Amino acid sequence: MTLVRAAPATVHGTAFRGHERVRVVLRRPGRAAAVREVTASAGGAFSVAFRGTAVDRCAGFSLSARGGFGSRAAMRRVPRPACPPA
C-alpha cells in the first residue's frame, strides 16, 4: 500500500483478492480516524481518496487496509523529530 498524494490523502493498494471489499483507515495524531470502503479490481488493486483530508509531512500517520476475504496491508510514517517548515 502506498500514499500517492498528500492532499487529498490518496492511497493505492495491490495484492488483494479480486473484487474483495476493502476497508481503509487513515489515522493522524489528534484527529478522528477517516474510514473509506472500496472494492478491489479484478486484479486485486484499489485507489481511494480521503477528500478533505490531508497528511502532514512532519506529523506522521498510519494507514491500514483489511479486505473481506482476509487480505491486509498497513503502512506507517512516524513523526519527524525536527522537521523544518516547507
Image: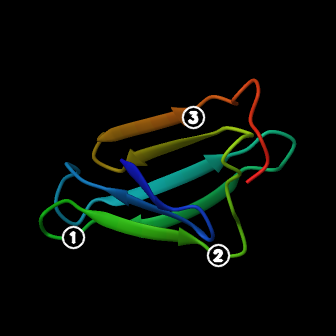
Residue located 36% across and 60% down the image:
12
Residue 23 image position (x, y, % from top left): 48, 55
The image quarter containing residue 28 is top right
Tell me, yes or no, if residue 39 can be seen here: no
Q: Are marks 3 and 1 in contact (CB under 8 Å)?
A: no
Q: Is residue 11 visible?
A: yes
Residue at 73% across / 54% down in the picture?
Answer: 86
Left or right: 52, with 6 as reference point: right
- In the displayed structure, 6 sits above or below 26; it is below
Pointer 1 or 2: first along the chain: 1
Q: Which residue is mark 3?
A: 77
CB atoms of marks 1 and 2 within 8 Å: no
* Disc 2 residue crowd, few under 14, some 14–19, many 20+, Cα 10 Å: few
Q: What is the crowding at mark 1: few (fewer than 14 residues within 10 Å), some, or many (at least 20)?
A: some
Q: Which mark is residue 41?
A: 1
- Which residue is outermost to the bottom? 51
C-alpha gap between disc 1 and disc 2: 21 Å
User: N-terminal of the two: label 3 or label 1?
Assistant: 1
Amino acid carrying mark 1 in the image? Ser
Q: Mark 2 and mark 3: span between their CA atoms?
A: 20 Å
Q: Which residue is mark 2?
A: 51
Residue appearing at x 27%, y 59% in the figure: 20
User: Which circle, 3 or 1, is nearer the viewer?
Assistant: 3
Quarter location, residue 74: top left
The correct choice, above or below, for 69 with respect to 72 in the image is below
Is 83 situated left or right of 37 in this image? right
Q: Residue furthest top?
A: 81
Q: Position of residue 5 (x, y in %)?
A: 50, 65
- Residue type at numbered disc 2: Arg
